[in-house]
């Protein structure tokens, strides 16, 4: 992913984005905001929620990563959906 992420994007952050996320420290992040704070060329500050395999947010993080190293995470669990009321039939 070379385009600038946007709030709502689900990203895979691993060692390609920064060595601090290499190996077992990789994570899936739901972006909340993208900072305009000064960063080195090709790097970006992101704030978001770490998403677990069930799609639940587990922690809020602010991370500094290489833009060229972040990937869209299409294989992550979908966010939980709110329960819908069950439609009841009025027929007797």
Image (cartoon, rainbow, N blue to C red):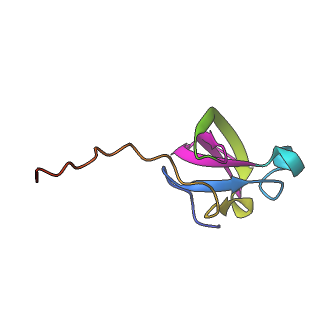
Give how far across and how far down residue 20 sits, in percent: 84, 43
Residue 73: quadrant of the picture: bottom right
Query: Does the magenta portion include 65?
Result: no
Instruction: Say which residue appears at 16% left-offset and 52% top-offset.
Output: 89
- Give the x, y percent position of residue 57: 58, 38
Front residue (pair 78, 41)? 78
Horizontal and vertical percent position of residue 76? 63, 57
Can residue 27 be spotted in the picture? yes
Q: Main secondary structure of the magenta part?
A: strand
Q: How many marks?
A: 0
- Tell me which segment is drawn in magenta: 27-53
Q: Is residue 19 visible?
A: no
Left or right side of 86 for 51: right
Q: Residue furthest front?
A: 92
Image quarter where the N terminus lies is bottom right
Q: Is residue 29 magenta?
A: yes
At x 11%, y 51%, the residue is 92
Q: Position of residue 51 (x, y in %)?
A: 63, 44
- Residue located 50% across and 54% down the image: 6
């Amino acid at each position: 992913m070379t385009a600038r992420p946007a709030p709502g994007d689900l990203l895979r952050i691993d060692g390609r984005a920064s060595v601090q996320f290499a190996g077992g420290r990789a994570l899936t992040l739901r972006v909340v905001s993208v900072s305009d704070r000064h960063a080195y060329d090709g790097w970006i500050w992101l704030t978001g929620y770490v998403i677990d395999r069930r799609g639940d947010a587990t922690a809020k993080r602010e991370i500094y990563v290489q833009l060229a190293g972040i990937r869209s995470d299409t294989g992550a669990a979908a966010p939980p959906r709110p329960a819908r009321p069950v439609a009841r039939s009025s027929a007797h």
